[in-house]
């Protein structure tokens, strides 16, 4: 499983992963998270009305699994937390689902020195670090995301034989395009799909570079 689709944004990644899961054979198991607002952030009555279960369930942010995980045996996933680095269970480790239980997932490690070993993953309580969420909440869910597709930022550190770069939306941050194309170990394994506007005939995309970074070099 040394291949993946990369995209700039999480919404595109989720759409691709949902499509791939639908195309897979086998029974689909749905896992739902339990979400709670951290006590230090729930004192205000004004915010209390906003923190409904439905609202917390709808939050999607980088580094935290979605409220609803749809998994099948054979699904590739990526670990979202450092659980046991000495045994290869680090943030970014790719695994393959081999068995689906009610309380644990059995997975086979796909990358690193521990590739081929089987591990059991429990649910964990995770707090997102994303600053765009204006309050702290905790999500208890299996610490994985489906990894047929992943964001370009999340792909950093990966070495892949085949990469499909899906630019339904253009890159938006510093050298993001460079990061994406450098994930592939051989140029022949790189495919790029551009989705330009109808009036855009250039058939090209831009690598965003913040020139201010280089001013003092």
Image (spheres, rainbow, N blue to C red):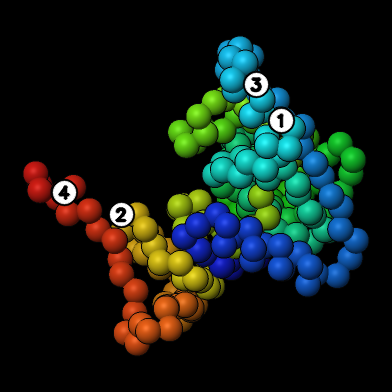
> Looking at the picture, how far across and down is residue 135, in whole percent?
54, 26
As displayed, is residue 4 above or below residue 191?
A: above
**Count of all numbered marks drawn on residues in the image:** 4
Q: Quadrant of the N terminus?
A: bottom right
> Looking at the picture, how far across and down is residue 209, in whole percent?
25, 58
- Answer whether residue 151 is visible to the viewer in this image: yes
Reading the image, the residue beneath label 2 is: 174
The numbered mark, 2 or 1, whose residue comes first in the sequence reads 1
The numbered mark, 4 or 2, whose residue comes first in the sequence reads 2
Reading the image, the residue beneath label 3 is: 48
Mark 3 → mark 1, Cα distance in angstroms: 8 Å
Mark 2 → mark 1, Cα distance in angstroms: 36 Å
Mark 3 or 4, closer to the camera: 3
Q: Badge 3: how crowded within 10 Å, few (<14), some, or many (20+)?
A: few
Mark 3 → mark 4, Cα distance in angstroms: 41 Å
Is label 1 in contact with label 4 (beta carbons under 8 Å)?
no
Mark 4 → mark 2, Cα distance in angstroms: 11 Å
Reading the image, the residue beneath label 1 is: 52
SS at mark 2 in the image: loop
Mark 1 or 4, closer to the camera: 1
Name the residue rendered at 66%, 50% in the picture. Answer: 145
- Answer whether residue 161 is visible to the viewer in this image: no
Mark 1 → mark 4, Cα distance in angstroms: 42 Å
Nearer to us in this view, 23 or 52: 52
Asked if residue 212 lies left or right of residue 164, the reply is left
Q: Badge 4: how crowded within 10 Å, few (<14), some, or many (20+)?
A: few
């Amino acid at each position: 499983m040394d291949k993946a689709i990369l995209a700039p944004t999480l919404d595109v990644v989720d759409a691709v992963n949902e499509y791939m899961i639908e195309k897979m054979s086998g029974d689909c198991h749905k896992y739902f998270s339990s979400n709670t607002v951290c006590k230090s952030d729930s004192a205000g009555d004004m915010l209390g009305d906003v923190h409904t279960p439905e609202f917390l369930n709808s939050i999607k942010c980088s580094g935290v699994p979605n409220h609803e995980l749809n998994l099948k045996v054979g699904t590739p996933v990526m670990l979202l937390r450092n659980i046991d680095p000495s045994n290869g269970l680090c943030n970014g480790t790719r695994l393959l689902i081999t068995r689906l239980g009610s309380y644990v997932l059995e997975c086979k490690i796909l990358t690193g020195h521990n590739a081929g070993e089987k591990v059991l993953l429990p649910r964990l309580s995770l707090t997102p670090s994303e600053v765009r969420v204006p309050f702290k909440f905790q999500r208890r869910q299996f610490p994985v995301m489906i990894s047929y597709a992943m964001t370009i930022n999340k792909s950093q550190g990966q070495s892949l034989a085949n990469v499909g770069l899906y630019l339904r939306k253009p890159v938006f941050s510093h050298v993001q395009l460079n990061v994406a194309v450098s994930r592939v170990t051989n140029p022949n394994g790189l495919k790029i799909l551009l989705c330009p506007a109808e009036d855009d005939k250039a058939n090209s995309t831009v690598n965003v570079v913040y020139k201010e970074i280089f001013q003092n070099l």
